[in-house]
Amino acid sequence: MSFKIIASQCTQCGACEFECPSGAIEFKGESYVIERDKCTECEGAFDTQQCASVCPMPKTCVPA
């Protein structure tokens, strides 16, 4: 499984991009996206998903 970013709620702050240990988040077009094939949900690296923990907008980084 992977996470996704709800584009309509994303403020484009970029915090998630720099916290992602697998490099799965990048800015495309007008918003950030999580590449499903790269997302590991931070398993083995962190106890919680880093994108969701640093995002200033609640429920913007969510399970896909």
Image (cartoon, rainbow, N blue to C red):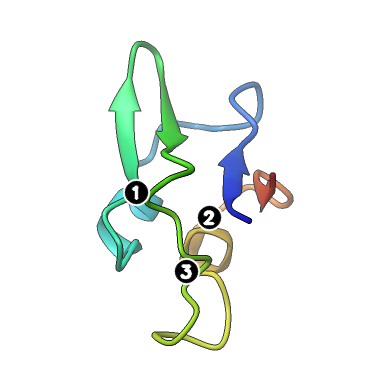
**Residue beneath the point at 63% across and 47% down:** 57
Circle 1 sits on which residue?
A: 24
Query: For the residues carrying marks 2 and 3, which lies nearer the camera in this image?
Result: 3
Query: For the residues carrying marks 2 and 1, which lies nearer the camera in this image?
Result: 1
Between the C-alphas of marks 2 and 3, the distance is 8 Å
The numbered mark at residue 55 is 2
Q: Amino acid at mark 1?
A: Ala
From the viewer's perspective, is residue 43 above or below residue 12? below
What is the x, y in percent for residue 30? 39, 13
Q: Amino acid at mark 3?
A: Gln
From the viewer's perspective, is residue 19 above or below residue 56? below
Quarter of the image where the N terminus is located = bottom right
Whichever of labels 2 and 1 marks the residue nearer the N terminus, that label is: 1
The numbered mark at residue 50 is 3
Q: Secondary structure at mark 1?
A: loop
| Circles 2 and 1: CB atoms closer than 8 Å | no
